[in-house]
Image (spheres, rainbow, N blue to C red):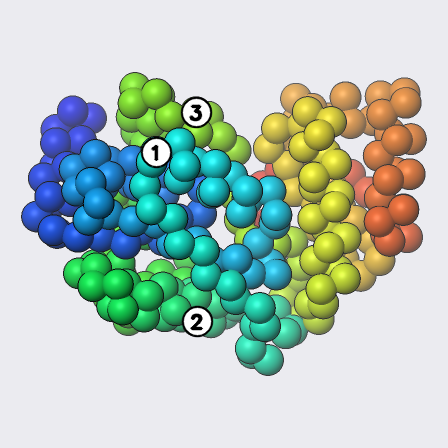
Amino acid sequence: MDTLDEKYVALKTSLREMGSLLVAFSGGVDSTLLLKVAYDELGENAAAVTIDAPFHSRYEIGEARRLAELIGVRHIILSYVQPTEELANNPPDRCYICKKEVFGSCLEMAQQSEFSILADGSNVDDLQDYRPGRRALEELKVRSPLQEAGLTKAEIRELSRLLGLDTWNKPALACLLTRFPHGEEITAQRLNMVEQCEDYLRQKGFGLFRVRAHGGTARIEVMAEEFSRLVEAGMREEITAFFHGAGFAFVTVDMDGYRCGSMN
């Protein structure tokens, strides 16, 4: 089994061989590491592209801008104003549909800007998870250099720490569509309700969490160690008042805690 150093060398070698690269950049742990190493190896022949869509939170777009500026790399923002009707009811294959549309736009940008390759931040662990969007990446021939180098999520976090990236311990990100059950209509208002409430929990200092929306009910997922703070005197009243103000009729806490992909 290759060591972390060996995987890092393999990643750098692979990126140099690509010659030029456009990184689909979310500002998350994985894509930030990929962008940093790509820029270190390719300089001006590497750039980042971020999709600004209604189902991406303003916080995440802001983080992508900040991190790209910190790295010093050219950063392109592509507006994706109106998702297709196929996504309107959040179908089970939403991730495939979304990736096909979003990465298709990124691929056009890469070709127009004469980048030889479009890459994403998928890692080895993603192969074990439910990732319907992976098929879209394969169809569009998007490369996944971190995955190709054999890097796991834990190794990506460690390598990010060693390279001085402040994303090394950043909580996992996911688009706002994942907060709604399949088949439930997605509207700008409902996306805004969830985004407001998640921003509020972030401001309150909660770490890894999700606000899942079931009609007029908000289901809060936090890590088990943060349960007590969520419901302590004063905090519970503040949170429920804010959520009601955002438009939710009922506010609940999921006793199973935070689970990646709990809406799958």
User: Could you tell me how many numbered marks the image carries?
Assistant: 3
Q: Is residue 192 above or below residue 93?
A: above
Q: Is residue 17 above or below residue 242?
A: below
For the residue carrying disc 1, how many other residues have a C-alpha within 10 Å: few (<14), some (14-19), or many (20+)?
Answer: some
Apparent side of residue 250 relative to residue 81 in the rendered image (left or right): right
Q: Earlier in the sequence, mark 1 or mark 3?
A: 1
Give the residue type that dot 2 points to.
Glu
Q: Earlier in the sequence, mark 2 or mark 1?
A: 1
Q: Residue at x 48, y 67 (%)?
A: 98
Quadrant of residue 184 in the image?
bottom right
Q: Nearer the viewer, residue 176 or 118?
A: 118
Give the residue type that dot 1 points to.
Ile
Q: Residue at x 16, y 37 (%)?
A: 41
- Image x and y of residue 210, in percent: 65, 42
Q: Nearer the viewer, residue 156 or 14?
A: 14
In the rendered structure, are the residues bearing label 1 and label 3 in contact, judged by CB atoms less than 8 Å apart?
no
Label ID, residue 166: 3
Of the 4 image quadrants, the one containing the N terminus is: top left
Apparent side of residue 246 relative to residue 10 in the rendered image (left or right): right
Q: Residue at x 75, y 43 (%)?
A: 197
Label ID, residue 71: 1
Apparent side of residue 121 relative to residue 242 in the rendered image (left or right): left
Q: Secondary structure at mark 3?
A: loop
- Image x and y of residue 251, in percent: 85, 44
In the rendered structure, are the residues bearing label 2 and label 1 in contact, judged by CB atoms less than 8 Å apart?
no
Quadrant of residue 206 in the image?
top right
